[in-house]
Amino acid sequence: MSLYIPVQRSPKQSTRTQGYFEGMPTEQYASDPGLNTSTFKNIESESNKRHKKSFRDFTQGFATTLGEIRAMFMEIKSQQDQKYNALHESMSKIVNQNEDIHKSVEFMSSKYDELLEKVPQLEQINSNKLIAKQTDHHSRTKN
């Protein structure tokens, strides 16, 4: 009786590939140097096409976005121009009013100065009349 222990532990090559890989084309999982390279070229060209297309879409989207930003800035500029014009018009009105007020104050000031000059004169005339009246009244009462 002899004890024989098999040294080969893996199943035979033919039984390993049967089952799971059965029916699959060898081009997709084999590492044979003669693989179908046209498949890889197609994949590369498709990925390049997609990349170029997405880049083109990006630049078109960027141009659209840039156009939208420009339109927004033009709208903001238009609104600011309207506000500036309204402020400028209001400031012009205020400047004109201030000039009118300044002229009125100068006129009132000159009239006040004239009155200040006339008051002592009028007081003098009034006091002279009062003195004349008093002397006239005294002279009548003596007679």
Image: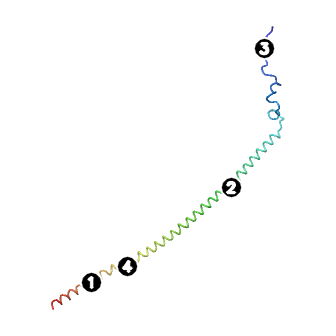
Judge from the rendering whether residue 75 lies leftward or rightward of residue 98; answer left or right.
right
The residue at 54%/67% (across/down) is 86
The residue singled out by tag 4 in the image is: 111
The residue at 50%/71% (across/down) is 93
Kindly indicate whether the residue at mark 3 contacts the one at mark 2 (C-beta within 8 angstroms).
no
Q: Is residue 8 above or below residue 68?
A: above
Task: Give the mark nearer the N terminus: 2 vs 3.
Answer: 3
Residue 13 in percent (x, y) is at: 82, 24
Name the colour scheme.
Answer: rainbow
Q: Residue furthest left?
A: 142
The residue singled out by tag 3 in the image is: 5
Q: Amino acid at mark 4?
A: Lys
Q: Is residue 37 above or below residue 83?
A: above
Residue 128 in percent (x, y) is at: 25, 85
Kindly indicate whether the residue at mark 2 contacts the one at mark 1 (C-beta within 8 angstroms).
no
Q: Amino acid at mark 1?
A: Asn
In the picture, the disc for residue 51 is none
- Which class describes the residues within 10 Å of circle 2: few (<14), some (14-19), or many (20+)? few
Residue 47 in percent (x, y) is at: 76, 44
Residue 54 in percent (x, y) is at: 72, 48
Q: Quadrant of the C terminus?
A: bottom left
Q: Amino acid at mark 2?
A: Thr
Q: Secondary structure at mark 2?
A: helix
User: Where, by quadrant of the figure, is residue 113 drawn?
Assistant: bottom left
The residue at 72%/51% (across/down) is 57
The residue singled out by tag 1 in the image is: 126
Q: Secondary structure at mark 4?
A: helix
The residue singled out by tag 2 in the image is: 64
- Which class describes the residues within 10 Å of circle 3: few (<14), some (14-19), or many (20+)? few
CA gap between label 1 and label 2 equals 91 Å
Name the one closer to the observer, 92 or 21: 21
Q: Nearer the viewer, mark 2 or mark 4?
A: 2
